[in-house]
């Protein structure tokens, strides 16, 4: 996607160049960070092996040294040690505001604190081993570190690991697949440092008990260590100081030059010096916004519509353009974290946010938000309008309270969640946790319990009701969007939306035409991988679809079919019994409800 260029083309070219630099520097920072995290992970796992003894620790160290002490591993590791901090500092220096979420501030603080401890560790191990051929085996290093340096080394381990895990979490949290193994990631993030510390303590105490002569450290070696430590720290923090001077000089320059006018639809107009990204402007002025990836062009939650001034912006850089193509963004939609206006601009936030949020609050999408396969149930009482005209208000509300109480118990007993009540009906979802086959099975089982509960209500209230209660239930399995909406008046509510919900609603409506209590789509039956008795094959017309949807109607509570040998049908039998668009070969005709159509060789169309 390329926005038209006219006025400000020269500045746009310069801005495009800066964006290209920002794009590839992010990639370099990411790759070098992954190399360092990989090294740290193998190092910490090596520590954890110390639980099994110092000998096992030394054995794993030999395997680890095979790669990291090779010329490939050495270049990759120490190149990353130089490149990653440099480009991380460059990213910090590019910021035009230091108002940021606590998680981002924590990651920056960790990155600045790590060299204080890491430089000493590197010099005392790898540098001393290379220059003076000092023993780098675990039994020797652990004797040097324990117990005087045990606390600082443990702190270093935790700082490095926390810094890396925060970065990986930022990278993955916007991906759909992350939710499937987020718990595994969290477990690993806790276990690796914990086991590493335990292994370090166990092996260090074992090394102290070994009958080995003390290591001799000459004054030359001591001076060499002190010199290298001071030299490395001076370079790093001198670099930090240079960046701070650069930031201060830039701020003085921009504050003494011209200003631009930024118009934020719904949030007023601001004047400021050019340079910050639009996302940084949101943070500076306390405008509620969303930023899932923290401004790294890995998500599209901060996207804005450029209403006026789009022609002065440079075209999207590679990462931004790729993401905009992925979401099929229309013209003039840009990522707020990637555009740095040099001229007047008017933008509108596209991701819905609460206007009454606390000033400066970063509104991030819920961690559970996303697409997933679910089984959706929509249920509704039939002829409720006629019933309401013949009942007193107190009796009607009392009956509804009893009805929804029974329905709620039936849903929650099968691990479902009621997402919405409306009038005399409700919508429930299954499959938020666990396999989809189980979700489809329990949804059908919950429908059977609901039908039986309605029958029980008829027996209980039969004498007081002018006509018996009847329920219509539609069930469909498919992909849906889940998340949470929030407002000051209604509070927070979990919702499920998408085509799957629409189809389940239309299947519920079809129960009136087919005279069935429950209509279940073939997709749900296939997912459940079970045969059910008393079904009628149906073809349901769905709005927006050219071909009818294959479904099965139940004239009473759904019941799992039993074969001659007893027990439930196997998955292979069920799949064999479900040819496309046809009904089960093993099902029986619909039982005696006169309103229900009989099972026949051809599906009933509705």
Image: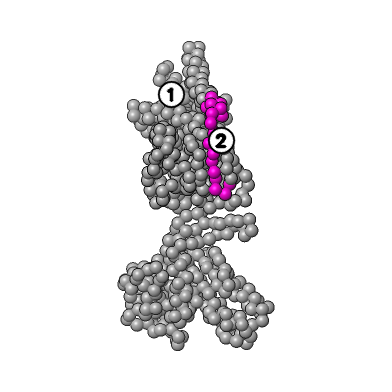
Quarter the C terminus occupies? bottom left
Residue at 43% from the left image edge and 47% from the top image edge: 332
Residue farthest to the front, as pictured: 7
Against 370, residue 84 (above or below) is above
Q: Residue 40, can we see it?
A: yes
Q: Residue 244, can we see it?
A: no
Q: CA distance from mark 2 to mark 1?
A: 49 Å
Residue 126 numbered mark, or none = 1
Q: x, y percentage for residue 602?
A: 33, 80
Residue at 57% from the left image edge and 43% from the top image edge: 269
- Front in this rendered view, residue 535 or 13: 13
- The answer to whether 15 appears left or right of 576 in the picture is right
Q: Which residues are magenta?
A: 247-267
Does the magenta segment cover residue 277? no
Residue 272 numbered mark, or none = 2
- Front in this rendered view, residue 555 or 259: 259
Q: x, y percentage for residue 170?
A: 48, 42
Q: Nearer the viewer, mark 2 or mark 1?
A: 2
Disc on the earlier residue, 2 or 1: 1
Disc 1 is placed on an element classified as: helix
Against 220, residue 264 (above or below) is below
Residue at 34% from the left image edge and 82% from the top image edge: 600
Residue at 64% from the left image edge and 82% from the top image edge: 391
- The answer to whether 316 appears left or right of 187 in the picture is left
Residue farthest to the top, as pictured: 219
Does the magenta segment cover residue 248? yes
């Amino acid at each position: 996607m390329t926005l038209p260029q006219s006025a400000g083309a020269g500045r746009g070219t310069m801005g495009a160049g800066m964006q290209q630099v920002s794009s590839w520097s992010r990639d370099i920072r990411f790759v070098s960070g992954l190399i360092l995290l990989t090294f740290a992970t193998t190092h910490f796992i090596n520590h954890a092996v110390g639980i099994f003894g110092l000998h096992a620790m030394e054995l794993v160290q030999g395997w680890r040294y095979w790669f990291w002490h090779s010329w490939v591993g050495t270049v990759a590791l120490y190149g990353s040690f130089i490149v990653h901090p440099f480009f991380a500092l460059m990213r910090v220096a590019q910021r035009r505001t230091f108002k940021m979420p606590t998680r981002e501030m924590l990651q920056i603080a960790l990155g600045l604190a790590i060299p204080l401890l890491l430089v000493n560790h590197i010099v005392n191990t790898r540098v001393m081993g290379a220059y003076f051929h000092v023993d780098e085996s675990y039994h020797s290093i652990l004797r040097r570190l324990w117990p005087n340096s045990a606390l600082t080394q443990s702190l270093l381990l935790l700082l490095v690991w926390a810094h890396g895990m925060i970065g990986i979490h930022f990278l993955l949290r916007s991906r759909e697949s992350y939710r499937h193994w987020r718990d595994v990631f969290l477990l690993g993030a806790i276990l690796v440092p914990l086991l590493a510390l335990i292994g370090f303590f166990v092996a260090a105490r074992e090394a102290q008990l070994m009958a080995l002569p003390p290591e001799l450290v000459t004054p030359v070696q001591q001076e060499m260590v002190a010199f290298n430590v001071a030299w490395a720290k001076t370079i790093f923090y001198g670099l930090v100081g240079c960046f701070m001077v650069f930031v201060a000089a830039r701020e003085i320059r921009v504050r003494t030059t011209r200003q631009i006018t930024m118009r934020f639809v719904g949030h007023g107009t601001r004047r400021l010096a050019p340079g910050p990204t639009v996302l940084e402007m949101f943070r500076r002025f306390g405008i509620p916004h969303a930023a899932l990836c923290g401004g790294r062009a890995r998500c599209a939650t901060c996207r804005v519509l450029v209403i006026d001034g789009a022609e002065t912006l440079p075209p999207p850089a590679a990462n931004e353009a790729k993401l905009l193509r992925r979401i099929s963004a229309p013209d003039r939609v840009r990522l707020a974290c990637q555009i740095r206006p040099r001229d007047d601009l008017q933008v509108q936030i596209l991701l819905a946010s609460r206007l009454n949020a606390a000033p400066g609050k970063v509104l991030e999408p819920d961690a559970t938000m996303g697409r997933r396969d679910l089984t959706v149930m929509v249920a509704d009482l039939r002829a409720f309008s006629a019933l309401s005209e013949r009942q007193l208000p107190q009796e009607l509300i009392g009956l509804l309270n009893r009805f929804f109480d029974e329905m709620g118990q039936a849903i929650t007993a099968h691990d479902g969640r009621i997402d919405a009540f409306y009038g005399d009906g409700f919508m429930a979802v299954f499959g938020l946790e666990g396999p989809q086959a189980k979700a489809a099975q329990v949804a059908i089982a919950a429908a059977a319990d609901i039908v039986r509960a309605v029958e029980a209500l008829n027996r209980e209230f039969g004498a007081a009701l002018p006509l018996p209660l009847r329920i219509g239930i539609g069930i469909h399995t498919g992909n849906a969007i889940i998340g949470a909406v929030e407002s000051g008046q209604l509070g927070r509510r979990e919702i499920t939306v998408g085509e799957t919900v629409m189809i389940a609603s239309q299947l519920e409506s079809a129960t009136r035409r087919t005279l069935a209590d429950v209509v279940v789509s073939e997709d749900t039956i296939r997912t459940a991988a079970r045969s059910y008795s008393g079904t009628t094959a149906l073809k349901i017309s769905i709005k927006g679809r050219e071909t009818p949807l294959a479904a099965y109607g139940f004239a009473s509570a759904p019941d799992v079919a039993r074969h001659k040998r007893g027990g439930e049908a196997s998955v292979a039998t069920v799949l064999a019994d479900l040819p496309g668009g046809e009904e089960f070969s093993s099902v029986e005709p619909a039982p005696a409800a006169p309103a229900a159509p009989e099972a026949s060789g051809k599906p009933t169309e509705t």
